């Protein structure tokens, strides 16, 4: 007590606590700025695009007349590209994740793969577009097609799927593996019978987050040279003649939601900007729904699993 | 221990716990504890793990207030001003400025040795260089670290050895001239040589300050303390002069624990 | 597990020879599966190699037409004119100014939010706020571009009537908001990794939350917080659509955020939107620009990776 009198100390503490409160308020204000920006963005798009949000908007092709333009080719294109992306990224990402967690020896090759994946996650998306332009479009001759876009986005979200797979596999306790091995199971039997079933939820979460990112990606698809005005649909994957399946759609030109929004946003006519707002609202809603689903899924997994 | 033991009534009290209950949520961790803490004496808290000895210690500087769901009942009175440390009206920050604590694992801040020892002073708004230098030297001398540290005061504290780090943490705790020094198993992360030097230090420090020490090591309790309290599942089973407790414990359970048959 | 049990029984009942062959075939199957999984893991390595190969091979051709020195020092960027100039400085200025504006928003706000969530907010508030921030970072950047061009710029023009419709300022501001969740979540992770006993040491000396946060937790998490900033910078430098939409695509050597200017990324978009013949110098410029971008983000990513590793090792 020789340092300061109790009264002095109390005054000092009161002063310090004031700063605590001041900082708490600053923190809440900063959070509010962040979240309010987001709410403003959402509401702004809803207001700007509200007049266009009607059923015909989904069933009309883009048009020179803003009032008649719709997102039919965009949402179908997005769906097709996403099918390709998922079909490539999910098996590759899960397989790579399993390899790294269950098989990979601790050698330099594994280190290279691991460092490489964490580095790829930080490569700007437009660089993937350049890769696709040089490799898929010209070297492989895939052109500006659904397949090119799907493959590009698949490579883009591959790190997300791999990391999610690894994290959910890592959460499985070693005792479960040992129990299966002790019964004479081979490595693959353990993976197939135990590792994969137990990590499905976590992998799914990662896949959804990756897909939500892919659905909104614009830059790599523009770089590939995708057309911005498409008033037709890719050929249907289902045909009336045997074998009833067609893969022509893979090589078809296409457009996707974000490109359609970009196209409409860059026009000076405000009527088109209303279209952009309406399509943007739909896109934000879709990504929000997907991310929300993933977060909810993760929350449920955390709550239910108690190893 | 100087033999003719003074009568307990004649010793000045530094603090005492009365009717102390403590709850972690629904779990009652301390049950109706009454215990004196005598001025400028070392009191050791012993007992099997989970007995509540650390929980009891952390009531003194209101560390439990940092986490939600904790509840105190009863009182810990600090003498001579007879204030109840657990009173809601008493600010835990003020309590922590008056009582210092040394933790199980040395916890140097990511700063220089000087800034570590000066931390409590700076927290109190003392920033004059001359005062800080004087207090830091005094504290380091009291913690028997001055000779080793005086030429490297501005080096990172992480660079010290484990035992030196713990002595620096003691210096940090001493620099603010605390009324009670709380030790929470201060040597459990240290090697025997570092442990011996800390024990030596505690014996010197009791000239200046009241000490309460939690230890899982009975020999340590026997070596350093004047009084010992044996706790079991949240209750104070036995309290008394350390040599009484170790030589002729009144409770069978205390004896079982001390002789290593249990715990 | 039932499959395993049956095959084990099979083995027990079959003669020794067939048991051996069974084991051999099983071994081969396991090897094949392992190889397939390994190849899948290699895809990411091939992606990197592909990126490096494409960028470097096209850039090599580009630099055979344009001397590196001109590329680095020329003060004009007119690759599609007859009198072509290729001064990357022009695009770099747009990238640096917009990133600078973004960081002026993202670093202070991101840091405050991280400290607030890690040291001040209770677990319940944190559980609500963190997923919301995560959602924020999931918004497609084209939508942020729309917002910057058609909401933020008109808003700013009310206070600054002379502000042009395309400008680096509103693109940078919106980009800053977009990056906040990246910065705050990595910085918060770093702070939460600081062991509790350091915090307790500080509280036990009578420190308040703010004193503990600023004097102990932030210094202890310093390298992780720096990693958060650096990864934020890397994101700002590589961001494309907000700038292509809201900052205009006109090359402009400027340090003034109130002006329109193209960034490296916006230039790539602009060229890709046009119809450039494969193999022309104009086509190759986007690869040279992309290589510049890649090198910049690579440096930041490696630095960020190293800093994060450092704080993970520390505690």
Image: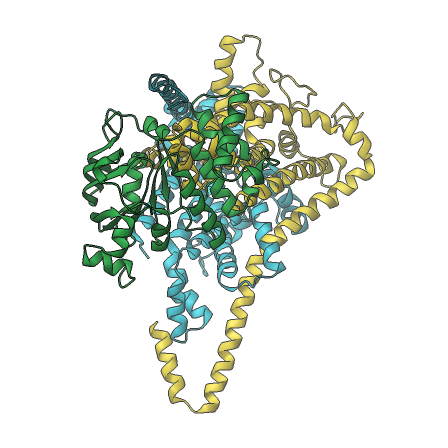
Chain colours: A cyan, B green, C yellow
Seen from the viewer's position, the closer of residues B51 and B140 is B140
Percent from the top left, x then y, of residue B134?
52, 26
Res. A225 visible in picture: no
Percent from the top left, x then y, of residue A122?
57, 41
Q: Quadrant of residue C232?
A: top right
Identify the residue shown where x is 61% and y is 32%: C237
Judged left or right of residue A229, residue C279 is: right
Percent from the top left, x then y, of residue A102?
49, 63
- In this rendering, the count of numbered labels is 0
The C terminus of chain B, quarter of image: bottom left
Percent from the top left, x then y, of residue C64?
82, 39
Seen from the viewer's position, the closer of residues A175 and C129 is A175
Question: Image height check: is B34 above or below A261?
Answer: below
Seen from the viewer's position, the closer of residues C190 and C186 is C190
Q: Quadrant of residue C63?
A: top right
Question: Image height check: is C38 above or below A62?
Answer: below
Identify the residue shown where x is 51% and y is 35%: B141
Identify the residue shown where x is 39% and y is 56%: A199
Judged left or right of residue C72, residue C165 is: left
Seen from the viewer's position, the closer of residues A244 and A20 is A20
Res. B67 visible in picture: yes
């Amino acid at each position: 007590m020789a340092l300061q009198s109790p009264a002095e100390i109390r005054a000092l503490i009161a002063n310090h606590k004031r700063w605590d409160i001041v900082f708490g308020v600053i923190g809440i204000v900063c959070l509010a700025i962040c979240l309010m920006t987001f709410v403003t963005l959402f509401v702004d798009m809803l207001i700007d695009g509200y007049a266009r949000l009607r059923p015909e908007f989904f069933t009309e092709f883009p048009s020179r007349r803003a009032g008649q333009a719709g997102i039919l080719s965009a949402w179908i294109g997005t769906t097709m590209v996403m099918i390709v992306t998922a079909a490539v990224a999910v098996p590759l990402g899960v397989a790579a994740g399993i390899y790294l967690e269950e098989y990979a020896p601790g050698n330099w090759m594994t280190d290279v793969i691991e460092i490489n994946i964490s580095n790829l996650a930080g490569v700007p998306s437009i660089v993937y577009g350049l890769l696709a332009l040089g490799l898929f479009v010209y070297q492989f001759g895939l052109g500006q097609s659904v397949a090119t876009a799907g493959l590009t986005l698949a490579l883009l979200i591959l790190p997300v799927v791999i990391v999610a797979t690894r994290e959910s596999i890592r959460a499985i306790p070693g005792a479960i593996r040992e129990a299966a091995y002790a019964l004479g199971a081979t490595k693959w039997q353990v993976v197939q019978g135990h590792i994969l079933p137990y990590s499905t939820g976590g992998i799914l979460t990662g896949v959804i987050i990756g897909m939500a990112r892919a659905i909104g990606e614009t830059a790599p698809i523009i770089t590939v040279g995708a057309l911005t005005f498409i008033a037709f649909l890719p050929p249907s994957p289902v045909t009336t003649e045997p074998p009833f399946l067609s893969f022509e759609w893979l090589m078809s030109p296409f457009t996707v939601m974000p490109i359609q929004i970009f196209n409409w946003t860059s026009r000076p006519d405000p009527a088109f900007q209303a279209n952009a707002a309406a399509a943007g609202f739909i896109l934000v809603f879709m990504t929000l729904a997907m991310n929300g689903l993933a977060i909810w899924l993760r929350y449920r997994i955390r709550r239910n699993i108690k190893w | 221990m100087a033999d003719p033991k003074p009568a307990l009534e004649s010793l000045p009290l530094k603090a005492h716990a009365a009717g102390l209950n403590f709850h972690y949520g629904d779990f009652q961790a301390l049950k109706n504890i009454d215990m004196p803490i005598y001025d400028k004496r070392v009191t050791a808290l012993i007992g099997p793990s989970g007995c509540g000895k650390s929980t009891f210690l952390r009531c003194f500087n209101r560390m439990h207030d940092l986490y939600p769901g904790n509840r105190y009942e009863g009182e810990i009175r600090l003498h001579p001003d007879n204030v109840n440390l657990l009173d809601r009206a008493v600010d835990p920050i003020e309590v922590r400025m008056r009582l210092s604590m040394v933790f199980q694992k040395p916890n140097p801040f990511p700063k220089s040795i000087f800034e570590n020892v000066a931390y409590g002073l700076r927290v109190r708004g003392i920033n004059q260089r001359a005062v800080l230098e004087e207090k830091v030297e005094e504290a380091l001398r009291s913690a028997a670290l001055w000779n080793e540290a005086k030429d490297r005061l501005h080096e990172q504290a992480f660079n010290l050895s484990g035992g030196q780090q713990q002595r620096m943490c003691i210096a940090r705790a001493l620099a603010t001239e605390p009324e009670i020094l709380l030790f929470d198993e201060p040597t459990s992360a240290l090697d025997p040589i570092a442990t011996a030097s800390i024990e030596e230090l505690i014996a010197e420090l009791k000239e200046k300050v009241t000490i309460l020490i939690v230890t899982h090591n009975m020999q340590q309790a026997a070596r350093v303390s004047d009084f010992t309290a044996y706790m079991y599942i949240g209750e104070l089973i036995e309290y008394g002069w350390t040599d009484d407790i170790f030589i002729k414990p009144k409770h069978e359970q205390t004896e079982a624990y001390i002789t290593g048959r249990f715990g | 597990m039932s499959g395993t049990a049956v095959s084990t029984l099979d083995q027990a009942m079959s003669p020794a020879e067939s048991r051996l062959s069974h084991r051999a075939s099983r071994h081969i199957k396991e090897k094949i599966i392992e190889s397939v999984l390994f190849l899948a893991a290699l895809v990411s390595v091939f992606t990197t190699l592909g990126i490096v190969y494409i960028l470097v091979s096209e850039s090599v051709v580009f630099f055979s037409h344009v001397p590196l020195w001109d590329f680095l020092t020329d003060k004009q960027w007119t690759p599609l004119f007859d009198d072509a100039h290729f001064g990357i400085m022009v695009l770099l200025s747009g990238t640096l100014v917009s990133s600078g504006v973004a960081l002026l928003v993202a670093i202070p706000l991101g840091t405050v939010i991280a400290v607030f969530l890690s040291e001040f907010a209770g677990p319940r508030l944190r559980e609500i706020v963190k997923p919301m921030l995560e959602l924020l970072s999931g918004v497609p950047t084209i939508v942020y571009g729309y917002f910057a061009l058609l909401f933020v710029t008109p808003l700013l023009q009310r206070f600054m009537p002379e502000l042009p419709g395309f400008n680096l300022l509103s693109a940078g501001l919106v980009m800053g908001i977009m990056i906040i969740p990246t910065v705050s979540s990595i910085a918060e992770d770093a702070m939460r990794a600081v062991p509790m006993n350091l915090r307790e040491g500080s509280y036990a000396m009578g420190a308040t939350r703010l004193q503990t946060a600023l004097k102990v937790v932030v210094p202890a998490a310093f390298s992780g917080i720096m990693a958060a900033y650096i990864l934020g910078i890397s994101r700002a430098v590589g961001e494309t659509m907000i700038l292509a939409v809201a900052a205009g695509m006109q090359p402009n050597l400027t340090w003034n955020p109130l002006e329109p200017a193209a960034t490296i990324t916006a230039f790539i978009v602009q060229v890709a939107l046009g119809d450039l013949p494969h193999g022309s110098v104009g086509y190759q410029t986007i690869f040279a620009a992309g290589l510049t971008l890649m090198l910049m983000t690579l440096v930041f990513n490696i630095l960020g990776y190293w800093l994060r590793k450092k704080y993970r090792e520390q505690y």
